[in-house]
Image (cartoon, rainbow, N blue to C red):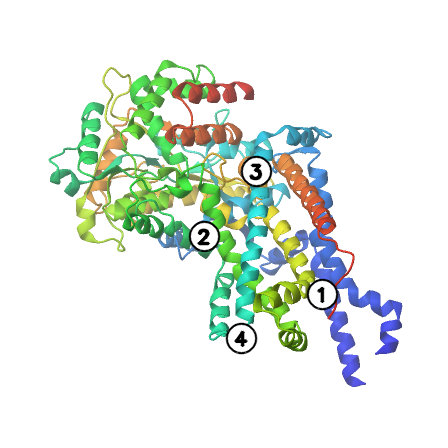
Amino acid sequence: MKTVMSNKFAIALYTLPALLLILVLIYIPIALSGYYGLMDWDGIGEMTFIGLDNYITLIQDKLFWSSTWHSFLLAIFSTASLLLYLAISLVLASKIKGSDLLRKIYLIPMLLSSVAIAQLWMKIFDPTNGMANKLLEFFGVENTPIWLADPKIALYAIFIPIIWQYAGFYILIYYAALKNVPDEVIEAAKIDGASPFQIAYKIKLPLISGVFKVTIMLAVVGSLKYFDLIYVMTGGGPNGASEVMASYMYKEAFKLNNFGYGSAIGFGLLVICLLMTWLTSQLTKSKDDVQF
Amino acid sequence: MKKKAFATVMSMALAGGLILGGCSSSDETAKDSSGSSSDKTVVKMMHLWPEGSSNAQFTIVDDIIKAYEEENPDVDIQTEILGNEQYKEKIKVLSASNELPDVGITWAAGYMKPFVDGNMFAPLDDIVEKDKFVAGTLDAFSVEEKPYALPLELNITPVYYNKEIFEKYNLEAPKTYDEFLNVVETLVDNGVTPITLGNKDRWTGSMWYMYLADRIGGPESLNNAINRTGSFEDPALVKAAEEIENLVNMDAFVKGFNGLSNDEAKGYFMNEQAAMYLMATWELPNYTTSPDVDQEFKDKIGYFKFPTYEGGKGDIDSYVGGPGVGLFVSEQSKVKDEAKEFVSYLVDEWGKRSVVDAGVIPATVVDTSAGDLHPMYIDILNDLGNASNLTLYADVQMSAGVADVHLNQIQALFGGQTTPEEFTKTQEEALAAEK
């Protein structure tokens, strides 16, 4: 085995398939979409080179910036909801009765496909027959909201299922990390007279801070490029009130036949994601990593 | 040792397979498939009626292909079938790489134009028999007088209504717009949703606006605004927008219509929670022949023509509608002649069977005396025969960019986020900017 691993040729051979796949499926398309962004192209006929025109339009495009703002709102909300997930996992990881069952219950939304979740929540948000409004009516609310049809609340209404959808995923990560905290440390704290709150705040949290940083990164980047539920539930509407960057890119490229401009949006999305990743890693950087 | 050798061979094979799989161009695969049926001419066709969701259409096309292959033993028709949205996307991708199927489905006017401009579709003026088609349907698939696809379907849009709900409140199908407003008001007063509308899809609201524009200003006002011989700021078009605003303020439409898709909105009508529904004749099977719908419900449904507007220029026999899909032949096709022949055969046979078998009204003239048709179909087909005008859906007439402006404005108008004046002004600007 050792001889194989020290053989440069063998290493190259074994990594080649993965490398090729990544190149063909990811890096080459990224370069290509940057290139298409320089073109005036409807995706069907001839391309014409127009230099940076698409990118200049992009910078002045109000719709793009409002969809960027919506993506950032989603990023803020999903990052904030991480705290909630963390609290739930802290409870689940302490030895309470039925934590096994509860963990599975939280995980189920993650197993559903996005489209199924979207359909489910569209039924819930139905203004006349939906569960949300029936419940509100039961409590005596008269002017029940029209949810996805109201430009002021449509975006926030979709945040609810998105946050619900990913709860299981993050809870699972936190749960696994918390289970990795050695029992001896906690025992020692207990003997020293630490309260459960102190154990959670002063011992468990610092020990899983690395995992927490990773999840912040996942939440931010995941939110910025989010697409599924928005596309199915509102299609970015009404009147762009719930448009996010990815849905705007899709709309320009495929619905409006502006493939060149759509590519430019895609490239802009990539740049924003890279910037945010770098920024998040800078903000969450700490000098001393806590070790077990 | 043996084991190790085996593993090495396997991993080499795997790597090789990946590399080859990644590199093999689609040209090669095309050659392969034509090579396998050596002496036959292969015509590739793509359509959008999967066996599961559009069984009736699938069966008709399948039967026609079998019959054609029997008559022409040297031709082999190979089909690829995708659902509506996937189809639209795949066609776009294929055309970008110049690999369109020999025969395929396209939509009219604005959708088709980039394909024609990009020289993707072959002109079909050499095979078309104009008098076979209902007047106006071929125009929607023509660019500069040349048809680039042959229409298969034709739809007009009546207002369907629930007779039971109407009877309960002593209402009758309205003939004038004032009567219509009275119907709406009575229903609202009694807590019944008058009209269901899925305006998340936007084209649904556009049909309401188009009808009002037609009844107030006549068919010319909207058509001229779009073809730029007129203006979108025409007083009739502003007036029509004001009437929409008025209907919204009367609570004529179902609650939250801007967030409902057409399918969700249809649910309200099918569950008898709303009294009226303006939709194209592709809905007819649900009220006549479909085995999935209760007979009791079907008997309750009738339709009326969109009412006339007092002092307006449009008459009651003018319809909003248009051909649905048509068949194109690829310009790049190597078997163009065979493909064209097959297309005209398919259009002919489709016209004979589509109403009876699938409830789809074909763009070719139908002989109503043959076969036993549901009375509602006979009525609609007769109305179609007496139609004074057919206005093609506005978003289909416009190019994709302008259509998007129009549809967004429709949603904003219905949602009260714009005024009738701004509504017309924004569209006038978008239309003017394009020329």
Q: Is residue A121 left or right of residue B112?
A: left
Image check: B189 left or right of B406? left
Amino acid found under the numbered disc labelled 1: Gly
Using the image, tell me which numbered label, if any, was put on residue B17: 1
Residues at marks 4 and 3, common chain? yes
Residue type at tag 2? Ala
**Front of the two marks 2 and 3:** 3
Q: How far is the residue under mark 4 from the one under mark 3?
A: 44 Å
x and y percentages locating residue B349 in the rendered image: 37, 45
Q: CA distance from mark 1 to mark 2?
A: 38 Å
- Give the labeled residue for mark 3: A67
Query: Secondary structure under badge 4?
Result: loop
Dot 4 corresponds to which residue? Answer: A95
Q: Specify the farthest residue to the bottom.
A: B1
- State the residue at coordinates (51%, 52%): A162
- State which mark lies toward you, 4 or 3: 4
- Residue count near mark 4 (Cα–Cα under 10 Å), binned few <14, some 14–19, many ≥20: few
In the rendered image of this protein, does residue A173 appear above or below residue B96? Answer: below
Callouts 4 and 1 on one subunit: no
- Please report the residue visible at 83 percent of the width from the left and 68 percent of the height from the top: A11
**Residue A197 x, y percent position in the rendering:** 57, 65
User: Is disc 2 in the same subunit as disc 4?
Assistant: yes
Residue type beneath disc 4: Lys
Location of mark 2 (residue): A118
- Element on which disc 2 rests: helix
Identify the residue shown where x is 78% and y is 75%. B8
Horizontal side, residue A109 vs residue B354: left or right = right
Mark in front: 2 vs 4:
4
